[in-house]
Image (cartoon, helix red, strand yellow):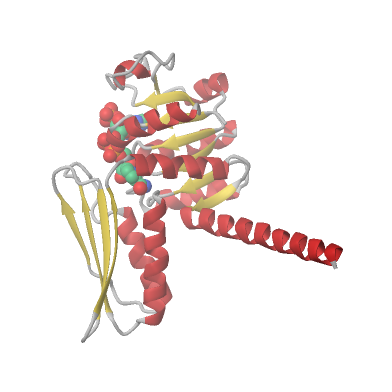
Amino acid sequence: MKIALVGLGRTGEVVARYLLQKGALSMVMCRPNSSKVNKDLGSILNMQETGIIVEPTDHLEERLFYRKPDIVIDFSCSSFLRDNINTLAKCGVSVVTAVTGYDAAEINKIRNVAEKGNIGVVMAPNITYGVNILMLMAEIAAELMSDYDFEIFEEHHKYKKDAPSGTAKKIADKIRNNGMTYREIPTHAVRAGGIVGKHKVLVCGEYDQLEISHESFSRVAFAQGAYKAAQFIYDKKGFYEMNDIFEYEKRQRSLIMSECRAEQTLAELDLA
Ligand SMILES: NC(=O)c1ccc[n+]([C@@H]2O[C@H](COP(=O)([O-])OP(=O)(O)OC[C@H]3O[C@@H](n4cnc5c(N)ncnc54)[C@H](OP(=O)(O)O)[C@@H]3O)[C@@H](O)[C@H]2O)c1
C-alpha cells in the first residue's frame, strides 16, 4: 500500500514518522508556498534523508499520475479536499481525511463523489480508537439514561482553529439520535497550551452522575488511527466513517468465531 500524506503541521509530522516506520509512505505534499516544499522529509523531521521530497499540492493530477499512491491521508485543512476531491476520484486515489471543520456543503460534496463509487473515502474527524469507544458508550448512556442531562467538555491546544471540535459535535449528534431528543447538548471548549486532545461526556441526574472521558496524550494515537483507516479503505469504494471500520471488524471477528466453533463441532463429531 502506497500512502501520500497531505499536511506537515503538528500532527502531519508525527503521522509522517509513523508511516515511515511502517514502510508505507511514498509521497508528502504541502501548501505550494510552504517553506517545506522541495526539502527532503528527513531534514524536516530531524532524521536521516528519506529520499521523499516534499511536493506542493498544485498540478495534483500530474503528481498523482507520476507517483501513483493508493491512498491520500489528509491532515491539512478543509480546502484541500474541497478543491481536489474530483481530481482524486479521477485518478482513483482513495482518501482518509482526519481534517475537521468541514461545512455541510463540503461534506456533501465529498460524500457524493465517494458514493459515485470510483474511490473510497473515510471521513474521520475522530480518528483515535479510544474516542470512538467513548462514542459507543455515550450512545448506550443516551439510550438508557434519557432523563439525565448530557453535557460535553473538550480541551485542545491553543492553535486548534475550530471550536467545538468535530468530535464533540459528533458525540452530540450521537447522543441526540440515540436519546431520540431534539434538545441541544451544551458543549464547552477549552483552547490552551499544548493539550493534545480530551473529550468528556457528563451524564448528570438529580442524585448521581456518570462521566465518560478519553484523552490522547500523544499524536501517535492519530497516526495509528489514520493507518488503520488506510488499511481498511485500501480495497473498498464508497463513503465511510470510523464507526463503519469498527462494525466491519466486529463482523469479521464474529465470522472467525463461528468458523472456529464449526471446526470444533466437526472435530468433536470426528472423535465421537
Ligand atoms: N481527526 C482527528 O482525530 C484529528 C487529530 C489531529 C488533527 N486533526 C485535524 O487535522 C488538521 C491538521 O491539524 P494540525 O494540528 O496538524 O494543524 P497544523 O499544525 O495547522 O497543520 C496543518 C498543515 O496543513 C498544511 N495545509 C494547510 N492548508 C493546506 C492545503 N490547502 N494544502 C496542503 N497543505 C495545507 C499547513 O501548511 P502551512 O504550514 O504551510 O500552513 C500545515 O502544514 C486539522 O484540521 C485538525 O483539526 C484531526
State which quadrant residue 196 falls in: top left
For the N terminus, the quadrant is top right
What residue lies at 19% left-to-right and 41% top-to-bottom?
A: 159
Where is residue 175 drawn, in percent x and y? 37, 71
Where is residue 49 drawn, in percent x and y? 38, 13
Identify which residue, 269 or 120, lies in the foreground.
269
In the displayed structure image, the side of residue 270 where residue 17 appears, left or right: left
Q: 155 above or below 39?
A: below
What residue lies at 38% left-to-right and 55% top-to-bottom?
A: 130
Identify which residue, 70 or 141, lies in the foreground.
141
Q: 41 above or below 228?
A: above
In the displayed structure image, the side of residue 12 where residue 194 appears, left or right: left
Furthest residue to the front? 271
Identify which residue, 161 or 145, lies in the foreground.
145
State which quadrant residue 171 falls in: bottom left
Identify which residue, 119 or 236, lies in the foreground.
236
Where is residue 182 drawn, in percent x and y? 35, 77
What residue lies at 55% left-to-right and 18% top-to-bottom?
A: 66
What residue lies at 42% left-to-right and 25% top-to-bottom?
A: 28
The reply to whether residue 104 is in sight is: no
Of the four image quadrants, the one with ligand 1 is top left
